[in-house]
Amino acid sequence: MVFANTICLGTFAPLLPEIARAQGLADWQLGVLGGAFGFARMLADVPTGMLATRRLGTTLTAAPILMVVGVLLLGSAGPFAVLVLGRVLIGFGHTLSMVGGLTAILLDHRGGRGSVKLNAYEFAGMAGVLAGLTGVGLLPSTWGWSRALLVASSPVLITVVLAPRLRRWFPDRLELGGEAERSARPVRAPRTARGMPGIVWLMFAVGIIMALTWSAVSQFLIPLRGTREFGLDRAGVSRLLALCQIVDLLVLLPVGWLADRLGRMLVLSLVACALALGAWSAGLGSFPLFVAGCVFLGLGMAGWMFPLGVIREHTEAREFGWRTGLYRVGIDAAAFLGPLVCGLVGEARTGAFVGAVGLVAFAASIRLGWLALR
């Protein structure tokens, strides 16, 4: 399910320079178009978290329908407002898919190994993004961007066909009880004045930093800097973005295995450091460092699910769907702001912005490392 639903996410970024040329869009419009996906997810996160707790089947089956409509609108090559609406609907559909899937996984306590389960889910999603990037890169360069987008995104129809089965596999009312409820009791931790443990707020901040870095670099900097400064074509941009995904996929499960044995905090410190190196290299470096930045970005994104796993340890089961949605609001607000800020400052000054984000990521790495050692 998550593999098919994320393929259309990988098809967009390599086509961004062609969309700009064909549609005559300015940098700020590209920023809005790139950020519309995160903006939609930000709006939908909390309602989806609450919906997934009681209507899991409906949540998962509605996701691909919204994504198909969004892909059709985006691929219509219509006016700017229509393109943005298409990205918004794709964002809504992806939120239903991800929050619903995470709720199902994190409320299932059978077998333990929570980090491995989370990273296995992330693995499927990243494989879908990689498939989208690869598909766009392999299609004939003579095809227009809209045709390439529609063809490369077509596997999302698989989940539409599976919708009746999803309704049967996932009940609309999720009940917890007995051993599952007892095992879901949170670990005790000092709480803030607002009722959430301090560690939860820290994980919110780490997740926001990761989302801001990923969105700014992959959804704006790599496509536009690669095309305008280094002269890459659609296939070249696809290969660089695919490099990020390949590295992510290669290390995702081993990193999850290490986190279950060494502790999430220590591994989070390491991946945050890799994320900082990726931002600096991709934003400020020459072409060899630009490529190395893609590798570091892939390493950093291997810890994407760990903050949510830590939050789960300190959250009661009945609150987790809502808190997952709240966490995703922060993540998707950052995913919205990353391309938007890049578009507003312009491609020529995006490197400095991304470098500053990398500095924040490095500071977070030091903080997490200190907590892990303590």
Image (spheres, rainbow, N blue to C red):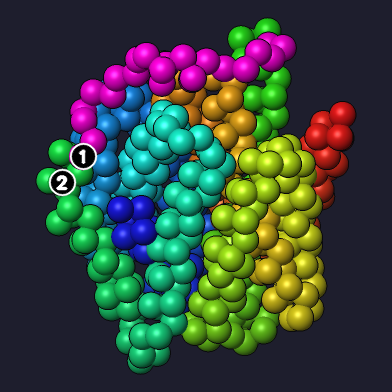
CA separation in Å, label 2 and label 1: 6 Å
Query: Is 163 on the left or on the right of 96, as rendered?
Result: left
Query: Is 337 on the left or on the right of 37, as rendered?
Result: right
Name the residue that disc number 1 marks.
169
Whether residue 98 is in magenta: the answer is no
The residue that appears at 55% across and 63% down in the rendered structure is: 249
Return the mark for residue 165: 2
The residue that appears at 62% across and 49% down in the rendered structure is: 257
Give coordinates of residue 26: x percent, y percent.
51, 66
Height in image: 67 above or below 319?
A: below
Image quarter for residue 104? top left
Nearest the camera: 363 or 368?
A: 368
Give the farthest residue toward the left: 164
Is residue 276 in view?
yes
Whether residue 188 is in magenta: the answer is yes
Query: Is 238 on the left or on the right of 154, as rendered?
Result: right
Give coordinates of residue 101: x percent, y percent.
37, 41
User: Quick one: label 1, few (<14), some, or many (20+) residues within 10 Å?
Assistant: few
The chief SS type of the magenta part is loop
Give coordinates of residue 156: x percent, y percent.
26, 61
Give coordinates of residue 226: x percent, y percent.
62, 78
Looking at the rendering, the stretch of residues picked out in magenta corresponds to 169-191
Height in image: 51 above or below 129?
A: above
Is residue 21 in view?
no
User: Quick one: label 2, few (<14), some, or many (20+) residues within 10 Å?
Assistant: few
Height in image: 370 above or below 300?
A: above
Q: Give the total number of marks visible in the rendering.
A: 2
Image quarter for residue 51? top left
Kind of residue sitting beneath label 2: Arg
**Circle 1 sits in a helix, a strand or a loop, which is it?**
helix
